[in-house]
Image (tube, rainbow, N blue to C red):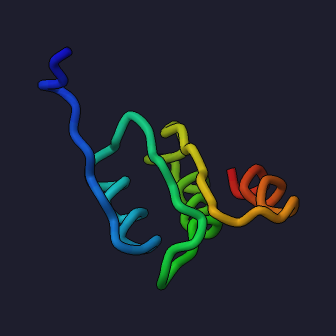
Amino acid sequence: MEFSDFRIIEASDGAQAVDLARQHQPDAILMDLSMPRLDGWEACRRLKADPCTRHIPIIAVSAHGYPDAQRRALEAG
């Protein structure tokens, strides 16, 4: 299987993730909820509040096993 049109853009923190999403308009975002500088929850909130990025689906991932993580991710968008 060839993925010639497939590209991954990696951010080192939540603030960079927001900037890169605005710049590159990806088809989807895989968001770690525990990132430095700006956590994934706030990055999701900012992306969903921005008319330029709110249409991008975000898949939130976390190593946290506490029940509140899912609720917080859904609230963040």
Residue 36 higher or lower than 48, as above or below = below
At horizontal 17% and vertical 26% (from top left) the residue drawn is: 5
**Nearest the camera: 52 or 30?**
30
At horizontal 30% and vertical 59% (from top left) the residue drawn is: 10
x, y percent for residue 13: 41, 74
At horizontal 49% and vertical 39% (from top left) the residue drawn is: 56
**Nearest the camera: 1 or 21?**
1
User: Does residue 27 appear to the left or right of 4 in the view shown?
Assistant: right
Residue at the outermost right position = 67
Residue 7's quadrant in the figure? top left
Residue at the outermost bottom position = 37
Number of marks in the rendered image: 0
Quadrant including the N terminus: top left
Residue at the outermost top position = 1
At horizontal 39% and vertical 63% (from top left) the residue drawn is: 17
x, y percent for residue 9: 26, 52
x, y percent for residue 76: 71, 57
**Nearest the camera: 10 or 76?**
10
User: Does residue 69 appear to the left or right of 58 in the view shown?
Assistant: right
